Image (cartoon, grey):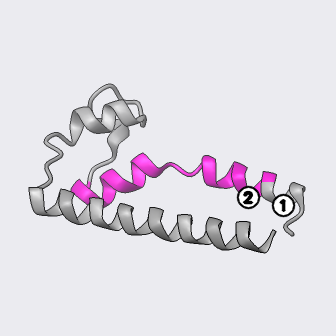
Amino acid sequence: MIPLGLVVILSYFVGSFPTSIVITKIARGIDIRNHGSGNAGGTNVIRVLVPLVATNDQVDEGLDVLESALAAVGEKKGAVAQLV
């Protein structure tokens, strides 16, 4: 079992990671803080990086992955319930 203090510390660092800055730097090579409202938040990212487009095939593939993941979780829960 992971100690609670370690979980809290790791959660703090993961939550403070500026994902929007990294994604916009990778996707468009820009610093999101210099565009739009100047905020690094998700709304500004959507405003600046429009259009966010996915083909039907990409959406179908993503849904297939999600369905597989949910099925795997359901199987694990079933196996744990049988052990109890």
Q: Residue 13: say if magenta.
A: yes
The percent coordinates of residue 5 (x first, y second) are: 88, 55
Is residue 38 shown above or below 18?
above
Q: Which mark is residue 64?
A: none
Report which residue position mark 2 lands on. 10
Q: Secondary structure at mark 2?
A: helix
Q: Which residues are magenta?
A: 8-29
**Disc 2 residue type (three-letter):** Leu
Is residue 47 shown above or below 58?
above
Q: Which mark is residue 6?
A: 1
Give left or right: position of 34 versus 51.
right
Give left or right: position of 50 versus 75.
left
**Mark 2 neighbour class, 10 Å CA radius: few under 14, some 14 to 19, many 20 or more:** few
The residue at 37%/61% (across/down) is 66
The percent coordinates of residue 72 (x first, y second) are: 50, 71
Do tag 2 and tag 1 residues touch (Cβ < 8 Å)? yes
Q: Nearer the viewer, residue 11 or 55?
A: 55
The percent coordinates of residue 41 (x first, y second) are: 42, 34
The residue at 46%/66% (across/down) is 71
Q: Residue furthest front?
A: 82
The percent coordinates of residue 83 (x first, y second) are: 78, 74
Q: Nearer the viewer, residue 50 or 58?
A: 58
